[in-house]
Image: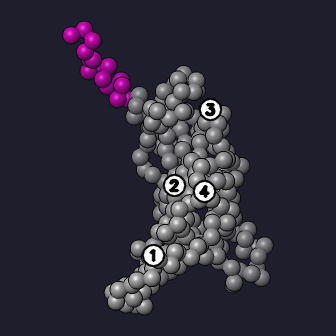
Amino acid sequence: MDNQLTDSQLFEQLRKKAVVKQVVYDNTYNSFKKFKQIIRAMNQKFHAEMSTERDRITFEYRDKGEFQIELQFAGDVLVFLMHTNVFEIPRDHDLMRTSYIREDKDRSYCGVIHVYNFLADSFKYNRENDLGYLIGRIFINKDMHYFIEGKRELGQLYHNFPTSVLTDDSAVEFIRSAIMYTINFDLLIPPYDEIKIANVAMIQSAINNMKMATGKRLGFRFLADQE
């Protein structure tokens, strides 16, 4: 069997793949640390510039560990989560047909940072049934190139994976766009017919623990966000 891999060839394939994935992980991890620094600085700037309003308007950065950041502003919380695994772009994705990836398949391996939007009261009252929404995610490869999938402003930021490099400026723009989208993503009243009947357990739970499920689009389709 002439085409059978030798141990040395197998080990070399393992080494190459491991090195690529480690570089991708390091790039994503360092980018996430950059996000932390930017959000922390934004928090300090808000309190410096809005000193007369800070008792009335919440703007708070919370470091929840190596892979999670929370930013609360007014009635919303943005949760930034870095996934610890490295992913490959699906083979049927448009990006896989670009010359950028065809020239070097290793460029298709990406780390990912997710951004979710929750209501601040969901955390304040420990409403475990409340819904959060993925409003965007950013993919970063071994070259520090990136692309974004997301709602409206976020999804329109950067589609040019072959040329878009994640810099301080582009990270700031991504975070600002996530905040702006959230500010404009308002809580809607759920349809009457979906909440017109309630059982005793639901009411007791709502009274005692504020557990009645709430979300910005609970019961509604994302008509304004469909793309």
Within 10 angstroms of label 1, few (less than 14), some, or many (20 or more) residues?
few
What mark, if any, has residue 225 been given in the picture? 4
Q: Position of residue 216 (x, y in %)?
A: 55, 70
Q: Position of residue 190 (x, y in %)?
A: 52, 75
Magenta segment range? 1-15
- Kindly check if marks 1 and 2 are in contact, taking CB atoms under 8 A apart as contact: no
Q: Earlier in the sequence, mark 4 or mark 2?
A: 2
Give the distance between the C-alpha atoms of the residues marked 4 and 2, in whole angstroms: 18 Å
**For the N terminus, which image quadrant?**
top left
Q: Give me the residue at 39% from left, 88% from top.
A: 203
Q: Earlier in the sequence, mark 1 or mark 4?
A: 1
Give the distance between the C-alpha atoms of the residues marked 2 and 3, in whole angstroms: 21 Å
**In the depicted structure, whether residue 121 falls above or below residue 43:** below
Q: Earlier in the sequence, mark 1 or mark 2?
A: 2
Q: Is residue 130 visible?
A: yes
Q: Give me the residue at 78% from left, 73% from top.
A: 49
Identity, as a three-letter code, of the amino acid under mark 1: Glu
Q: Is residue 61 visible?
A: no
Residue occupying the far left of the picture: 1
Residue holding disc 2: 114
